Image (tube, helix red, strand yellow):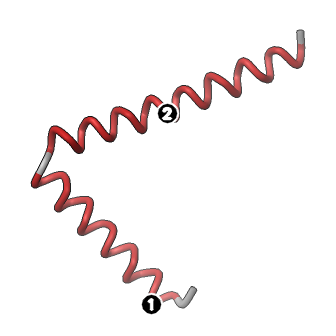
Amino acid sequence: MPPKLKTLLIWVVAIFLVYAIVTSPDRAADLVKALWDVITGAFASFGRFFSSLTA
């Protein structure tokens, strides 16, 4: 991917995120909480997997 296109896409995504947060902060907070729950659940699953390997 050309560097200028990559930079443009990053700016477009950043502007969209700011727009989404400003227009609907409650929904944006719910999405961040849901994403955080997925990430912590994945790490907990990895932990259980590796601990079951040693048992």
- Corner quadrant of residue 30: top left
- Give the label on residue 4, or none: 1
Quarter of the rendering occupied by the C terminus: top right
The quadrant holding residue 13 is: bottom left
x and y, in percent, of residue 41 in the image: 55, 26
Left or right, 7 with respect to 26, comes to: right
Of marks 1 and 2, the one in the foreground: 2
| x and y percentages locating residue 3 in the rendered image | 51, 87
Other-residue count near label 1 (Cα within 10 Å), few / some / many at <14 / 14–19 / ≥20: few
Towards the viewer: 27 or 14: 27
Whole-angstrom CA distance, mark 1 to mark 2, is: 32 Å
Q: Earlier in the sequence, mark 1 or mark 2?
A: 1
Q: Position of residue 1 (x, y in %)?
A: 57, 86
**Quarter of the rendering containing residue 25:** top left
Asked if 45 appears above or below 55 in the picture, the reply is: below
Amino acid at the residue labelled 1: Lys
Secondary structure under tag 1 reads: helix
Check the image and report above or below for 18 versus 48.
below
Crowdedness of circle 2 by 10 Å Cα count: few (<14), some, many (20+)? few
Q: Residue at x 19, y 56 (%)?
A: 20
Q: Is residue 26 above or below residue 45?
A: below
Q: Amino acid at mark 2?
A: Val
Residue at x 88% of width, y 19% of height = 53
Question: In the drawing, does residue 17 fall left or right of residue 10?
Answer: left
Q: Which residue is mark 2?
A: 38
Under circle 2, the secondary element is helix
Above or below residue 14? Residue 23 is: above
**Left or right: residue 44 compared with residue 24:** right
Whole-percent x and y of residue 24?
A: 13, 48
Label ID, residue 16:
none
Locate residue 55 relative to residue 48 in the image: left or right: right
